[in-house]
Amino acid sequence: MVQLVGSLRKELADSLSACRVLVVGAGGIGCELLKNLVLTGFKNIEVIDLDTIDVSNLNRQFLFQKKHVGKSKAQVAKESVLQFCPTANITAYHDSIMNPEYNVEFFRNFMLVMNALDNRAARNHVNRMCLAADIPLIESGTAGYLGQVTVIKKGLTECYECQPKPTQKTFPGCTIRNTPSEPIHCIVWAKYLFNQLFGEEDADQEVATLENSNTDGDIKRVSTKDWARSTGYDTVKLFNKLFKDDIQYLLTMDKLWKKRKAPLPLDWLEIQKLGKILEVTGTGLKDQQVLGVAGYSQLFSRSVETLRSMLADKGDGAELVWDKDDPPAMDFVTAAANLRMHIFSMNMKSRFDIKSMAGNIIPAIATTNAVIAGLIVLEALKILSGDVEQCRTIFLNKQPNPRKKLLVPCALDPPSANCYVCASKPEVTVKLNVHKTLVLALQDKILKEKFGMVAPDVQIEDGKGTILISSEEGETEANNSKFLSDFGIRHGSRLQVDDFLQDYTLLVNVIHCEDLEKDVEFEVVGDAPDKAPTPPSAQEDKNVANGNKDSAEPSTSSKAPAEQDDVLIVDSDEEEPSSSTMDVRMESGGHKRKLHDAETGEASAKRQRLDQPLAADEEDDDIIALD
């Protein structure tokens, strides 16, 4: 007769109490997961999260209370969970999982790793560390009512990077600066303006190729920040420059307005004369109301004054960081974006709408996090029982499928032979202009940003073993400002790239190309996440992105664009291949459902049964940020 401990077989219960597991992330999914783990019988848990608790977390991250605001999520989560099970041995790290001390040997201390992350870079990194350590990884993500859980096991399943994920959408600089046609253009402009005035310019890189030239013909130009400082951040001068003088300058470009409606400049004094009564439209909460031009002018003035004081308090050379949960910063972006919308004849938006777009947010649903956390534990029990082959990718749908199922299990896909991460000999081909690509761009934009490396070392296979990039500080900094061609790199050259932290080696084949599309610096041959396979169904699939920093991109694939991450909806309740062709945007990452990316960070299409169509997904938004 089988001996039970609670609802588990005694052997499995003993395994749970003895094994060490790592939880990466203590946000929406992480809080639910930690509670589930201790109540299931896990005794040795380590949790890591770099984030601190914000007021906006309290509606769904139930381990936190108002008194905890500003404290470490990992540490407070540990203290709260111990109240459920005081005998548990929990270690909390208030740190980034990408720090060098959390190396392959660190990961080998665990029998299982569970991701509850909110960004793609960290997901990529944990994926590689688990592959290097040969430790099973359970990846998860949520986006509103959608969610996904999947298992990654070296040599048995697809890894998180087997299928390309789309990058966060960018917008042409000329459109943002000169001819905005959608509210999102004005919001991106306002966020960029915040960085120009108070922070680090182009910190979010949301505007493609924004030019910051120091000269314009024979006219010397001063940076926006220096000019603003010289005026003492005078709100009237700032207002008239941004919304009057700059607009009048645009009007001198006659060709721009032959087929477009010309913008209408705003003058501070005229608005103050006409704006005694503040018009307000919309009902409901304050953040859901839309003010008039006078109201947003005053909000602009107040926010500039507040931000100026905050900057002054930090001292010379200080910078502010834009955060959607920082009221003065959000006030500034709301006011500036709406004033620009008015100038370009667009309907203005409420603070709530702008925050959603500016923060790339899809609202998080507490019950979605709870369901996904429960599924993570169920998959963990299979792994610890030695039944990895029974693990599944499971999708949580918003609506029941034709068989009245909300949860759809799919068989795990095998590793992709072409994956540049988990293949036996990872190799990739990159098309670029060797005469225009700097070594620094190769390091930062291609190796770190595109291929997710942390500290790459690059050696040219030229017979001499020339070191192009070294992870040792200062060794190759002199190379950064040189072009690849300066080192003899040409069409057909091969670069061996090693990231010792990730225990990862990648061979890069270089294809020289002088006719790349405008504003495109490089292309990965065969990697076109923005050109996802057309789904069999005529209906559009829906993207999923976790709108709070709680969700994670689906661990396995996404053959379609996904930044933030995607979930694929399958209308069958029977197990199917969890084809990485699925896209799901989750808090941080991808979904396997065919959903368009939000991301986060990032949609993919999932393989469906031949006799059943995929559930329809909503159309992809311009920006999706996974929380």
Image (cartoon, helix red, strand yellow):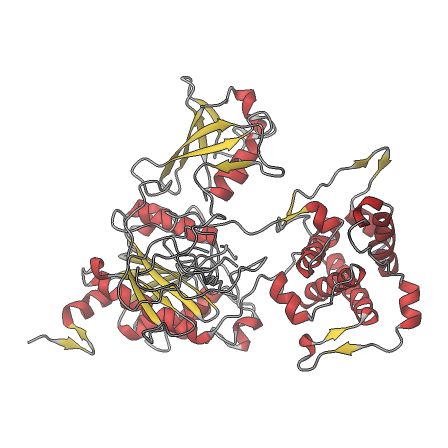
The furthest residue to the bottom = 284
Residue 339 position, x and y percent, is 78, 63
Residue found farthest to the top: 463
**Which one is nearer the viewer's eye here, 273 or 496?**
273
Q: Is residue 209 above or below residue 541?
A: above
Q: Quadrant of residue 217?
A: top right
In this view, the residue in front, 88 or 596, is 596
Q: Which residue is drawn at 20% across and 79% down?
A: 6
Closer to the camera in the image, 502 or 531: 531
Residue plotted at (39% across, 38% down) = 500
Which quadrant of the rendered structure holds the N terminus?
bottom left
Front in this rendered view, residue 273 or 455 = 273
Question: Which residue does the image show at 50% across and 48% down from the upper left?
Answer: 530
Measuring 32% from the left and 50% from the top, which residue is drawn there? 158
Q: Please give left or right for residue 493 compared with residue 180 in the image.
A: left
On the question of residue 326 being in view, the answer is no
Count of numbered labels shown in the rendering: 0
Up/down of 313 relative to 522, above or below: below
* Residue 529 horizontal/vertical position (percent): 47, 47
Q: Position of residue 427 (x, y in %)?
A: 37, 34
- The answer to whether 172 appears left or right of 294 in the picture is left
- Residue 185 lies, in percent from the top left, at 68, 56
Q: Is residue 461 left or right of residue 261?
A: left
In the displayed orientation, state which residue is furthest to the left: 1
Q: Above or below — where is 519 with respect to 296?
A: above
Q: Is residue 220 visible?
A: yes
